[in-house]
Amino acid sequence: TGKDNTIRVYSKLVSSESYTLIGETRLNRRGTIEANGGRPDITESNGVAHTVWHDDGGGFQRLFYASTDASVEDDKYSKWTYPVCVVSDAFGAAHPSIAADSENRVFIAYESQRNDGTDIGFVMKNRFGWSSPRTLVAASLRSKNPKIAIDSADHLHLVWEDYRNQNPQIYYAKRNGSTGEWSEPVKLTSETFGAVRPSIDCDDTKVYVSYTSQASNGTSSICGFYQNAGIWSSKVIFS
């Protein structure tokens, strides 16, 4: 039986009229829907670390979030909040990317499997709590591997791998930090055999994007762009 956070085990012989208590244990934490976790991402803002990951508890992948406890004065990175499920789509949510701005708003972009293929989903947390998940990109075929970064003006920058024209290319969009409005997607690459696995970062004025360029012989190279004052550079080949 289970009651008051305690599990008790009883036994009874066939010839007996009553049960006998043979053991009990007290639960020291609540149960969860977590199972196999993967693809974590982490960021830090204003002295608080934020992390997100996908987990296949319940038979499909959900997104979980935790942060360090800002109320701990000594080693503030040693104590984490209890994980909470922030996206629970029945068809699955995976491969999240996380960022936080100067106002302690937390943003998560992820692969959503609500529709055919995969779309880019988005959820955010402000002082009122978590928003409902929404679809940012629902192109034909697949959109995957989103990555996000915040600049010094709290604008959110997003890149992803997009298969709308069959060969994957890297696309970009920006969320205005003041209005919350998203720009229209911009196609950054035109690689003949595809561009995959983007990464993004920002400093005060520039946005930097790197990605893997695929070749016909199965090899690949690392390439990138940077944006300054809204203007994208020419492609740079790193290797």
Image: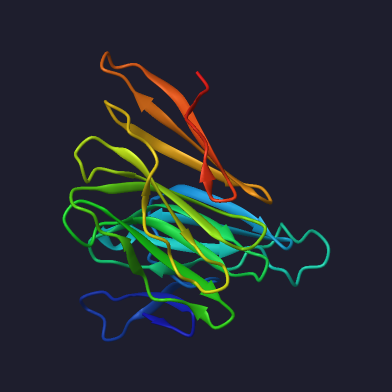
What residue is rendered at 26% in x and 81% in y?
16
209 left or right, relative to 95: right
What residue is rendered at 34% in x and 69% in y?
134
Out of 77 and 184, give the one closest to the viewer.
184
36 left or right, relative to 207: left
165 left or right, relative to 223: left
Out of 112 and 135, give the one closest to the viewer.
135
- Is there any visible trace of residue 23 in the rendered image? yes
What residue is rendered at 20% in x and 76% in y?
14
Out of 206 and 19, give the one closest to the viewer.
206
Colour scheme of the rendered structure: rainbow
Residue closest to the far top? 217
Quarter where residue 115 is shown = bottom left
Out of 224 and 109, give the one closest to the viewer.
224
Q: x, y percentage for residue 122?
A: 40, 64
Q: How many marks?
A: 0
Quarter where residue 162 is shown = top left
What residue is rendered at 18% in x and 48% in y?
141
Residue closest to the far right? 74
Q: x, y percentage for residue 161?
A: 34, 43
Q: x, y percentage for residue 200?
A: 52, 44
Residue closest to the far left? 116
Q: x, y percentage for residue 202?
A: 61, 47
- Is there any visible trace of residue 26 in the rendered image? no
Quadrant of the drawing holding the N terminus: bottom left
